């Protein structure tokens, strides 16, 4: 990634905090080194606290009905709005566009892991330019020349690895990894997570890549590269 957004943030779950679509919000509420989560924007659950709906929250933060109410309630303007939802096909539904425009119009940067590149949307880009906001599309595919082929070097790696796999999205693979890491840490076993999805990047894990934004020919190479870099740095 050629950008590294960090700072205070609101999570946008748009009425779906308790839905599987809210998995990115769930992940960031449970763990985040990249952002300091100040609150959640979710009109359906406004006026309540995050831990009522999401277990093992890193911090119990308030839920607001919209961006402006969040700024008023917090007494400060967060630097970022993170889209904490995963929609079918990675497209932003029309009913959620208002929240993005509201954030950009308030001078808040928007971070999106959707396949739809919000920065290429004419309305959003115009609002961002007018109010000095930035749109970070973290799932923007990388150029071929920046990708890595499989080399086979990993075959000589002695560091133990645990593969956590699933048959579908939103099954709890990443959350399972975090619980495994916590258990290893308690046993003084040094452990790192290799992320392969948007939430892992947004949580601030240092090594990984966005698998479904990577050309198939390079997936194994990018995974090998991430593991090898992690091993070299973590020794």
Image (spheres, rainbow, N blue to C red):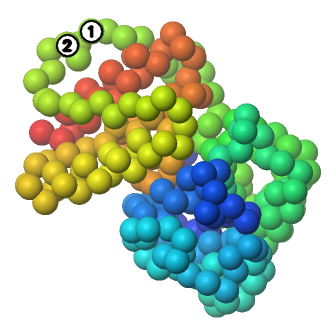
Residues packed near mark 1 inside 10 Å, few (<14), some (14 to 19) or many (20 plus): few
Spatial CA span between label 1 and label 2: 6 Å
Q: Residue at x 34, y 24 (%)?
A: 225
Q: Position of residue 160 (x, y in %)?
A: 14, 30
Q: Is residue 136 above or below residue 1?
A: below
Judging depth in this view, the residue of 139 and 11 nearest the camera is 11
Placement of the C terminus among the 4 image quadrants: top left
Question: What residue appears at the point 73 percent right and 65 percent down from the top-left corner?
Answer: 15
Image location of residue 63, percent across then percent down: 63, 78
Q: Badges 1 and 2: C-beta atoms under 8 Å apart?
A: yes
Please say if 20 is above or below 55. above
Task: Give the left or right position of residue 95, taking residue 48 as reference.
Answer: right
Q: Secondary structure at mark 2?
A: helix
Compared to residue 229, the image places residue 138 above or below, namely below
Residue 51 visible in the snapshot:
yes
Q: Nearer the viewer, residue 121 or 73?
A: 73
Secondary structure beneath dot 1 equals: loop
The residue that mark 1 highlights is 152
Residue 67, image x and y in percent? 75, 75
- Residue at image position (61%, 84%) is 48
**Residue 108 placement: quadrant:** bottom right
Question: In screen coordinates, is 101 left or right of 48?
Answer: right
Q: Of 40 and 34, which appears nearest the observer?
A: 40
Task: Kindly indicate the quadrant of the structure image that contains residue 177.
Answer: top left
Q: Sort mark 2 into few (<14), some (14-19) or many (20+) by Cα contacts within 10 Å.
A: few
Name the residue tied to disc 2: 155
Q: Is residue 215 left or right of residue 16?
A: left
Residue 200, horizontal then vertical, whole percent: 45, 46
């Amino acid at each position: 990634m050629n950008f590294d957004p960090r700072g205070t943030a609101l999570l946008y779950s748009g009425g779906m905090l308790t839905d599987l679509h809210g998995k990115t919000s769930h992940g960031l509420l449970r763990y985040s080194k990249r952002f300091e989560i100040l609150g959640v924007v979710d009109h359906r659950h406004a006026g309540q606290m995050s831990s009522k709906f999401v277990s093992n929250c890193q911090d119990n933060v308030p839920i607001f009905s919209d961006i402006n109410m969040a700024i008023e309630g917090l007494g400060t303007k967060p630097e970022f709005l993170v889209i904490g939802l995963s929609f079918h096909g990675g497209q932003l539904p029309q009913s959620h566009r208002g929240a993005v425009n509201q954030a950009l119009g308030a001078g808040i940067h928007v971070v999106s892991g959707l396949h739809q590149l919000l920065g290429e949307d004419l309305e959003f880009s115009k609002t961002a330019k007018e109010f000095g906001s930035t749109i970070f599309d973290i799932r923007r595919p990388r150029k071929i020349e920046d990708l890595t082929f499989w080399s086979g070097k990993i075959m000589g790696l002695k560091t133990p690895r645990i593969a956590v796999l699933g048959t579908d999205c939103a099954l709890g693979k990443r959350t399972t990894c975090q619980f495994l890491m916590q258990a290893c840490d308690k046993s003084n076993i040094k452990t790192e997570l290799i992320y392969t999805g948007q939430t892992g990047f947004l949580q601030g894990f240092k090594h990984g890549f966005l698998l479904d934004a990577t050309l198939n020919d390079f997936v194994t190479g990018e995974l090998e590269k991430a593991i090898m870099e992690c091993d070299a740095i973590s020794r």
